[in-house]
Image (cartoon, helix red, strand yellow):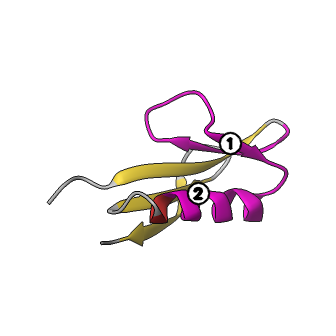
Amino acid sequence: MSEPMIIEAVPIFDGWAVKFQGTKSAYSTHDNKAAAVKAASELAQSMLPSAVKILKEDGTVETELDFAE
């Protein structure tokens, strides 16, 4: 079984970003948390197995959503 792709929804200075774990650049940016989580979840569903981590301002994980094959 392959390792899941981890996608993060992270708060940024002017909204929210979706990025792949371990990268600095954003895959996409959004005005609010709900839009970022939706975009991250849609991306995760296209890359099974995967997970979405929703991060707090301090970088800790608030919620994790798992997507299996």
- Which image quadrant: the N terminus? bottom left
Q: Amino acid at mark 2?
A: Ala
Secondary structure beneath dot 1 equals strand
Report which residue position mark 1 lands on: 28
Quarter occupied by residue 21: top left
The part of the chain drawn in magenta is 14-43
Report which residue position mark 2 lands on: 40
Where residue 18 sits in the image (x, y, percent)?
A: 62, 46
Q: Amino acid at mark 1?
A: Ser
Residue lying at 32% horizontally and 62% vertically, measured from the top left: 49
Mark earlier in primary sequence (2, 1): 1
Where residue 54 sits in the image (x, y, percent)?
A: 58, 57
Residue 18: assigned label? none
Residue furthest front as drawn: 46
Q: Is residue 43 left or right of residue 4?
A: right
Q: Is residue 50 left or right of residue 52?
A: left
